[in-house]
Amino acid sequence: MVVRSGKNEDGFFGFKGLIREHKGNGKKIFLLAGNDLKKIYKGAVLGPFWAIVKPIFTLSILWFAFYIGLRASGDIVHNGVPYGRFAFMLTGYVPWFFISEGIIKGARSIRTNKQYVTKISFPVSNIMTFTMLSMLYVHLILLIIMVVALLIMGIKPTLYSLQIIWYLPLMFMFFLALSWTTATFVAFSKDFENIINSIMTGLFWLSGVMWDTAGLKSDTLRHVMYFNPINYFANGYRRCFLYNESIFADPKELIIFLAEFVFVVLLGGFNYRRLRKILPDVL
Amino acid sequence: MEKQPIIDFDHVTKEYYLYKNDRARFKALFTNNKGVKKHKALDDVCLKVYRGESVGLIGKNGAGKSTLLKMITGVAYPTEGSVGVDGKVAALLELTAGFTDDMSGRENIYMKGYLLGLNDKQIAEIEENIVEFADLGEYIDQPIRAYSSGMKMRLGFAININIQPDILVVDEALSVGDNEFKKKCKNKIKELISSNITVLYVSHNADSIKEICDRAVYLKKGKVVFDGKVEETLKIYNDDNKPKKK
């Protein structure tokens, strides 16, 4: 097989290149994803289990604060039905944890794995894939813990819960495609990493992780919230496990999100193709 | 039918962007590197290497030798023109690249194998050769963060040399551990060369090029000045770089 470099045959958005880089590399990606988890928690007896300790600790505090401490804060009322505040936050926080880690670590991924870019011949886009995949492992465990916790609170999964096979892969793909842009930008300039780190706390409170965006009084504001993709997933998880609503319950939200999804994927492919070949020169 | 080159540089030009500062780099992201000063590391290089050839690369520092090697190993990409490589490349350049400190030597053999494009079966076949060649004793099952830098190099060398490459890229400035191991490496390289492998050899040492190569390329400021028999190339190189008499 002749490997030719230099000719650009990947098209404007570079998807041919992205697909080619992933073809036949499945096993390698899975291995590197596991390795990624091991690397972060090196030297610890509990190893990768630490990855789930942090979110569980945060959740316990939230539980204590809202279930024990601030009982008076009351229930969240969504479409006229009251839901326990802790159950509400739990179903928002579990996707949020994946999203926040996905945004931060995804953006850093190329810089963290510099040696794969500058020292060996490695399909760079695989770096983002295995980084996101390692976080997906953690997310799946948290998801199970979430379902169990909901069961303990007396909230049983229903047929609507199966809609998770729509939200979960979509969430993975969305933030993977986002990292095609952010990771290459961060590799170029550290400013982007700082920008991202700075806006994360803001994003948390601007998204419907802790409060119900559908309960906003102002119509305009409620519509603005549709443009926040994090909101889409936080609400989506609640549709699956709490509200028992269909993914089509709010067509406006769905359409706006899908438009954003297409935009992020195209932008990511475009930026990746544009910058991939000069990455080794700037790192 | 005409013989197909195993390495084929077709009018390759490589330009590096020289950003004045971090701000210029940030800006370049949005302006597509317009107006950024460039440095030509390779300038319209045409080079064809055929299977079984041993080619020496000579030239001063900054002549473009490393850039050329990087393109063969698939780390750097040409700005213009194209590079074709037809076969597995073993690069004795960055020996410890791709290692994970917290995995054992043996796990790293597999890891590196995957990174180099091998599958389980292929790695299992060469695993024992690698272990034997690296000669790390019990350390092979220890995490490599416990290795000395020499031990890491040895493992890296052992892996690269044992993957049955079609093309071997060697930089002479490479140092691998103690004299005994160095000798072992030299012998292994020679053994590979005699087995009809294609070799690219970078060196400042005329004697070792004469010993190993049958063809040499003289690079100067990114351009191929001469490409031919070793003696002729060396002569031109030496004439060109005679110390100036005061």
Image (spheres, coloured by chain):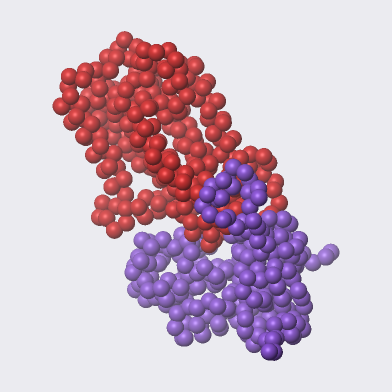
Tell me: A244 left or right of A31.
Answer: left
Residue furthest to the front? B246
Residue located 52% across and 38% down the image: A177
- Nearest the camera: A196 or A230? A196
Q: Which chain is tinted purple?
A: B
The picture quadrant where one finds residue A45 is bottom left
Residue A261 % position (x, y) = 53, 30
Q: Quadrant of the N terminus of chain A?
A: bottom right
Q: Position of residue A53 (x, y in %)?
A: 26, 43
Specify whether residue A186 is in view: yes
Which residue occupies 46% across, 49% down? Answer: A190
Q: Can you give x and y, in whole percent of width and height, for residue B189 in the image?
A: 58, 79
On screen, residue A179 versus residue A80, left or right, reads right
**Of A12 and B191, the residue lying toward us:** A12
Residue, far bottom: B245
Asked whether the viewer can see residue A23, the reply is: no
Tell whether B199 sits left or right of A133: right
Tell me if residue B48 comes above or below residue B173 in the rendering.
above
Chain A: colour as depicted: red
Q: Is residue B140 above or below residue A277?
A: below
Q: Which residue occupies 38% across, 37% down?
A: A200
Decide: is B91 above or below A220: below
Report x, y in % for residue A73.
21, 20
Question: Which residue is at the far right?
Answer: B1
Q: Height in image: A88 above or below B191?
A: above
